[in-house]
């Protein structure tokens, strides 16, 4: 127990798409913002001495600035950028930090060293994403399917520990699906105008005219970021996993679904509603989308969700396989896709051994699925029995950074 007293904790989940931060014991994070930053200066994410001004959060990024580039910042880089995190935590709080299930020993030690040396926190605990998701659901053993923005990870958890040898990952995540939808719409002549590129004038009561604006000093990265925000909303509003594997001929006459773009244009979306989500089950579909040539090689080597899940379970001990098949947890933003739970369960019933009782579980609340890692951390760090588990600053100073492996297994 740190200093003989309980440590108040801040829980941080640095996702590939969204960062979440808040106080342990609360139901939802206080701060939620995109895992991207804007900068009008030259920026090197590997340079810890960089003093460039950063624009963080949806509101700051939503305001167009001349020459503002947008950078996607991944897990460890977020920690290194003090200007991004200084306002989130204080030295009076312990930090419960979620980490990818595949984090190496070296990455964990670098993280612990950085947090103690740069942020001077009194205590730290590193917890695997899959363990926190499993904890949030009240299960000690489960197979966690985490559909993140940058990737999809499947990790078996047994008695509160990730079975590292059986962790499976795929580069197919929510951001790739968004890009596929964006490119597919463009190939059909639908051009998504970023919000900054036009203004709407009311020329008479209830009648609006769209006037295009020209900002030649807007970088391509910011234009693409602005388009992706809109394409992501389209995806979340109209897309759903098909009941059966996507087939071009079967879905060619599917009823169209309307969507009103910010510029007032209403578009009709047909087969793409089902084709884009089915990439999670059949990554080779990426090859059929114009403009996605750079991802064809990645997609061709990726496996679908059911295959990944079965392979992961088969790498575990025989004694726990049945329990894993019956406790498959969906988590992450992509897991909120309509009908994903039902389709995954259906496909797993076909792929799994006959004796297996397959059950895919997902919270009925999309927010809980999206924030499951953070919620698990909030519950865990608020328990009185957890206090003796912290990796304290004094232990770091006495035993060194390698002690994190013992304190945070």
Image (cartoon, helix red, strand yellow):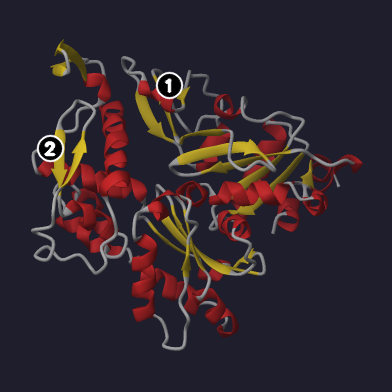
Q: Nearer the viewer, residue 13 or 79?
A: 13
Q: Secondary structure at mark 1?
A: helix
Q: Is residue 64 found left or right of 21 in the rendered image?
A: left
Residue 328 appears at what percent x and percent y? Answer: 49, 68
Q: Quadrant of residue 265?
A: top left
Quarter holding the C terminus is: bottom right
Residue 306 visible? The answer is yes
Determine whether 12 is above or below 60 in the image. Answer: below
Residue at horizontal 56 percent and vertical 50 percent from the top? 373
Tell me which numbered mark, 1 or 2, is placed earlier along the sequence.
Answer: 1
- According to the picture, the residue beneath numbered tag 1 turns out to be 60
Question: Label 2: few (<14), some or many (≥20) within 10 Å?
Answer: some
Determine whether 172 is above or below 198 in the image. Answer: below
Q: Is residue 268 found left or right of 90 in the rendered image?
A: left
Residue 98 appears at what percent x and percent y? Answer: 60, 48
Determine whether 98 is above or below 134 in the image. Answer: above
Residue at horizontal 66 percent and vertical 30 percent from the top? 89
Residue 219 visible? The answer is no
Residue 282 appears at what percent x and percent y? Answer: 26, 65
Q: Quadrant of residue 246?
A: bottom left
Q: Residue furthest bottom?
A: 355
Residue 190 — which label? 2
Residue at horizontal 18 percent and vertical 57 percent from the top? 287
Q: Residue furthest right?
A: 4
Q: Secondary structure at mark 2?
A: loop
Q: Residue furthest front?
A: 205
Question: Label 1: few (<14), some or many (≥20) within 10 Å?
Answer: few
Q: Nearer the viewer, residue 61 or 354?
A: 354
Residue 70 appears at what percent x and percent y? Answer: 36, 28
Residue 304 — which label? none
Separation of residues labelled 1 and 2 (CA atoms): 27 Å
């Amino acid at each position: 127990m740190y200093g003989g007293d309980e440590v108040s904790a801040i829980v941080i989940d640095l996702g590939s798409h969204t960062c979440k931060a808040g106080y342990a014991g609360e139901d939802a994070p206080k701060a939620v913002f995109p895992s991207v930053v804007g900068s009008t200066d030259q920026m090197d994410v590997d340079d810890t001495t960089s003093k460039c001004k950063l624009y963080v959060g949806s509101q700051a990024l939503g305001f167009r600035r001349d020459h503002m580039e947008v950078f996607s910042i991944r897990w460890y880089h977020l920690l290194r950028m003090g200007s991004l995190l200084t306002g989130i935590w204080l030295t009076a709080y312990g930090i419960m930090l979620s980490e990818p299930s595949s984090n190496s020993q070296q990455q964990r030690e670098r993280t612990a060293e950085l947090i103690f040396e740069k942020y001077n926190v009194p205590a730290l605990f590193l917890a695997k994403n899959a363990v926190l998701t499993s904890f949030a659901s009240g299960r000690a053993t489960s197979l966690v399917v985490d559909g993140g923005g940058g990737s999809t990870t499947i990790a078996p958890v047994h008695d509160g520990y990730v079975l590292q040898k059986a962790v499976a990952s795929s580069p197919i995540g929510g951001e790739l699906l968004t890009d596929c939808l964006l490119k597919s719409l463009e190939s059909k002549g639908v051009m998504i105008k970023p919000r900054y590129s036009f203004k709407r004038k009311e020329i008479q009561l209830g009648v609006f005219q769209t006037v295009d604006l020209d900002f030649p000093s807007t970088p391509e990265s910011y234009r693409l970021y602005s388009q992706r925000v809109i394409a992501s909303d389209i995806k979340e509003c109209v897309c759903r996993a098909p009941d059966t594997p996507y087939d071009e001929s079967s879905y060619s006459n599917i009823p169209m679904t309307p969507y009103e773009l910010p510029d007032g244009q209403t578009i009709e979306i047909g087969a793409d509603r089902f084709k884009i989500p089915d990439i999670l089950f059949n990554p080779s579909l990426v090859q059929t989308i114009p403009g996605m040539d750079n991802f064809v090689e990645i997609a061709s080597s990726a496996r679908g969700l059911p295959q990944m899940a079965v392979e992961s379970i088969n790498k575990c001990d025989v004694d726990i396989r049945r329990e894993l098949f019956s406790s498959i947890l969906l988590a992450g933003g992509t897991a909120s896709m309509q009908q994903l739970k039902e389709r995954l369960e259906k496909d797993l019933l076909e792929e799994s051994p006959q004796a297996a009782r397959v059950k895919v579980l997902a919270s009925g609340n999309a927010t809980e699925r999206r924030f499951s890692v953070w919620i698990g951390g909030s519950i865990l760090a608020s328990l009185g029995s957890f206090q003796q588990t912290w990796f304290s600053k004094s232990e770091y100073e006495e035993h060194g950074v390698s002690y994190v492996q013992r304190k945070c297994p």
